[in-house]
Each structure stands twice: as C-alpha cells, then as structure tokens.
Image (cartoon, helix red, strand yellow):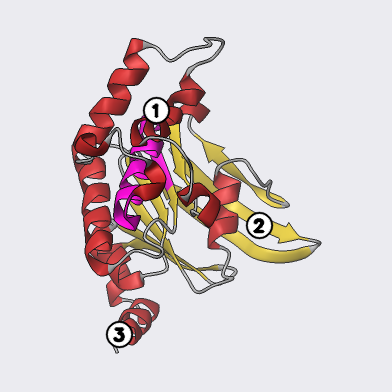
Amino acid sequence: MISFNGASFAYDDNIVLNAINFDIEEGAYLSIVGENGSGKSTLIKGLLGLQKPIKGKITISETVKIDDIGYMPQTNAVQKDFPASVYEVVLSGRLNKLGIRPFYSKKDKENALSNMEFLNILDIKNSCFRELSGGQQQRALLARALCAAHKLLVLDEPSSGLDPLACDNLYQALKDINLKQKIAIIMVSHDINRAVESADYILHLQNKQLFFGRTADYLKSDIGKFFTIRGNR
C-alpha cells in the first residue's frame, strides 16, 4: 500500500531523516517511535505529501486515493478552544468528500453520526467542543479523522497531554478501528511501551532508520530491549 524507498528529507540543506526504507500493507498498524527531534513528524509530512524527499521516493498504491486518508495532527490550544459543537467538528472531517458540492449530503451526516457512535461520543454530539475533557476532545478529533479515512488513518502524537485512563481509552479505540473497520493505522507515538502493546509493526527513528519490522521482533532486538526496559524504570 505504501513504500518508502531510500527517502531522505532535509531542512535548509541539513538532512533530518536519511535513507528510510519500509513497506506497509493494507490493514497494518504501524507505530513510529523515537526521541524528540528524531524525524517522526517529518516522515508523516512526507507521507502526506507536505514535504518532498530530497532523494529516494515514496510510493502509494493506486488503490489509495488522497481522500482515503484521515489525518489527526498534534492538537494545540487554539484547536482545543474551537467554538463549535462536537457534531460540527466531526462532520468537518467529510470536507474532502464534498468535491464541488456546497453542502454536506445525507451520507456525510450519517457517516459522522456512525463514527461518533463507534467511538461512544454520540451522547455529547450537541456539546460545545471546547468544554469537553481532553479525552473527549481527542475522541471527537479521532472521529473527525475517521470521517476522512477509508483505507488509512495517520495520527501524530494523539495521546499527548492525556491522563492514563483517557490514553488507555484512546489506544483501545484505535485498536478497534484497525481490527473492526480494517483501516490501516500509522501513528507517531512518544510512548514506546504503549506503542508495542498495540501496533503490529514498529519503525524506530533517530534521524535514520534504526529498526523496522514486526513488534515481536522489535521486542527481541537490542534497541527494542533497551528502550522498553528504560521506559519501565
């Protein structure tokens, strides 16, 4: 579905991510891990076409169209203070499906309600988004991204700032999306221990590719042992 073939990225002629090679098939669940400044968000920008590699290439299957990809970026204070209802926020995820249509269709509205029900936030659909808890806001934003996703959901640090319970709920929701809706997930995570509990594949970056493979193999590798043990200290 997606292939990185020797892809490298730079800012101001300084290479920040060098020679990345991996393949992700339909329905896979990949967590991208690494320390701050390791190139995780840069890789996501490359995947979404927001930054072009200076060498190498990224290949996306013809079966995956741009409007098949849902994206949940890192949230900031302005986004969390958005003055709209939960339903309006979630429905806005269908904007990429509108084409030349000026209004949301019945199908768009049904899709938004269905995703809210799937993520157990239908009961707060009329609530003001900025008055929600952090966990509720993240579920609403996840439902919004899910409205855009058909084949792939891309998330950049979705659990940032959440308390442990809200974080557990978010990771369970992502696992349900992957298993029940058969949507592939590519997620940047700062929490390696949680990542290995959920993902099928791990990509570990440190301005280059330190590891790519199945989670079970990552846990057996020297780098996997080092970082998961360190995280448990």
**Residue ranking furthest to the bottom:** 233
Marks 3 and 1, how far apart at CA: 41 Å
Q: Nearer the viewer, residue 151 or 22?
A: 151
- Quarter containing the N terminus: top left
Report which residue position mark 1 lands on: 91
Choose top left, top right, bottom left or bottom right for residue 112: top left
**Res 204 seen here:** yes
Mark nearer the N terminus (3 vs 2): 2
Q: Position of residue 122 (x, y in %)?
A: 22, 34
Mark nearer the N terminus (3 vs 1): 1
* Disc 3 versus disc 1: nearer the observer: 1
* Disc 3 versus disc 2: nearer the observer: 3
Q: Position of residue 158 (x, y in %)?
A: 40, 55
The region drawn magenta spans 132-154
Q: Secondary structure at mark 3?
A: helix
**Res 150 seen here:** no
Mark nearer the N terminus (2 vs 1): 2
The kind of residue tagged 1 is Leu
How crowded is the residue under tag 3: few (<14 C-alpha within 10 Å), some, or many (20+)? few
Marks 3 and 2, how far apart at CA: 30 Å
Q: Is residue 91 magenta?
A: no
* Residue ID at (23%, 64%): 197
Q: Secondary structure at mark 2?
A: strand
Q: Is residue 54 above or below residue 229?
A: above
